[in-house]
Image (tube, rainbow, N blue to C red):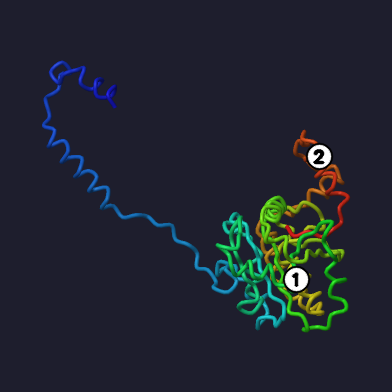
């Protein structure tokens, strides 16, 4: 500020060929100018009206593809959502929640979870009936786990981590609460129908698809999977009709020589990409 002040004071008004201005009148002029600016109307971008059920813009509402009545299920879902997913336009969790009764699809947003800040989630994690859907060497096949259980005798809670694969992995590893429930995975041969978003591999599923498969297994009702996937199919179909491109998985691109990005130099990343074409456990995206 001192340098600026000396610059302005080094030339007197007389030397500059200008008349001296009264400082108070200058300040008044500035106040008037800013006052005029403040009085200008503010242009607010109009948001498109949103459907309260499917959370989509009303012009592209997907309610005709949702069940007329919420699906009756005994299981309860807990979707632990990475904050970045909230800002994504083409999300599947709102469609999932719209298909299920209130209280059966609970969405909890965050990266870190603990007993103090999230006592309800902590209680769910400690419940012996709770399962967490996360593939790995410690995971049990969900179908094998429930094959000897009678339908409705055990009301399971299912935790699903909603985020990209790297986000989900990071959240699972850094939250000790998620290591308490029994870890399960899906082994059904199923290709993702969420073709408007890139998946790591052909068998990685969107959150809605994972929930659809898990609920159909737990409730012993394959119709649940079909009903839950109906709005997802409609969403992808609409997007493709309006210019969206089909996104092949990274696994597909690598296998078919279509991967056009530079290969990583990091050995760990190279091994991760090699694993894409050899790992066949169905993973939530």
Instruction: Please rate how many residues cluster around mark 2, counting C-alpha atoms within 10 Å: few if below 14, some from 14 to 19, many from 20.
Output: few
The residue beneath circle 1 is 212
Mark 1–mark 2 distance (CA, rounded to whole Å): 32 Å
Along the line of sight, the residue nearer the viewer: 57 or 172: 172
Q: Position of residue 89 (x, y in %)?
A: 60, 59
- The label shown at residue 103 is none
The residue beneath circle 2 is 270
Mark closest to the chain's N terminus, 1 or 2: 1
Q: Position of residue 24 (x, y in %)?
A: 12, 36
Q: Position of residue 247 (x, y in %)?
A: 74, 53
Residue 128 in which image quadrant: bottom right
**Seen from this angle, which residue lies furthest top?**
15
Q: Position of residue 170 (x, y in %)?
A: 69, 51
Along the line of sight, the residue nearer the viewer: 106 or 36: 106
Q: Going 88% across and 50% down the picture, which residue do you hit?
A: 278
Above-or-below relation of 113 to 127: above
Q: Going 61% across and 67% down the picture, which residue do you hit?
A: 107
């Amino acid at each position: 500020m001192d340098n600026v002040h000396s610059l302005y004071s080094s030339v007197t008004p007389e030397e500059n060929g200008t008349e001296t201005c009264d400082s108070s009148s200058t300040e008044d002029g500035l106040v008037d100018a800013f006052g005029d600016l403040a009085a200008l109307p503010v242009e607010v971008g109009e948001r498109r009206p949103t459907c309260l059920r499917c959370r989509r813009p009303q012009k592209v509402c997907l309610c005709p593809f949702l069940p007329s009545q919420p699906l009756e299920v005994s299981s309860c879902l807990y979707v632990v959502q990475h904050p970045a997913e909230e800002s994504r336009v083409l999300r599947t969790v709102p469609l999932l929640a719209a298909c299920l009764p209130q209280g059966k699809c609970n969405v909890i947003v965050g990266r870190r979870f603990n007993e103090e800040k999230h006592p309800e989630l902590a209680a769910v994690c400690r419940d012996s009936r709770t399962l967490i859907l996360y593939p790995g060497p410690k995971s049990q096949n969900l179908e094998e786990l429930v094959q000897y259980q009678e339908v409705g005798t055990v009301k399971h809670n299912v935790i699903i981590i909603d985020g990209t694969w790297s986000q989900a992995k990071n959240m699972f590893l850094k939250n000790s609460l998620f290591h308490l429930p029994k870890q399960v995975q899906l082994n059904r041969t199923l290709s993702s129908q969420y073709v408007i978003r890139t998946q790591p591999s052909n068998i990685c599923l969107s959150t809605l698809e994972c929930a659809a498969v898990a609920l159909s297994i737990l409730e012993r009702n394959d119709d649940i999977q079909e009903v839950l996937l109906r709005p997802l199919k409609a969403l992808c179909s609409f997007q493709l009709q309006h210019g969206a491109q089909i996104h092949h998985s990274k696994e597909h691109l690598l296998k078919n020589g279509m991967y056009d990005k530079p290969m990583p130099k990091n050995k760990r990343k190279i091994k991760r990409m090699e694993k894409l074409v050899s790992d066949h456990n169905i993973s939530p995206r």
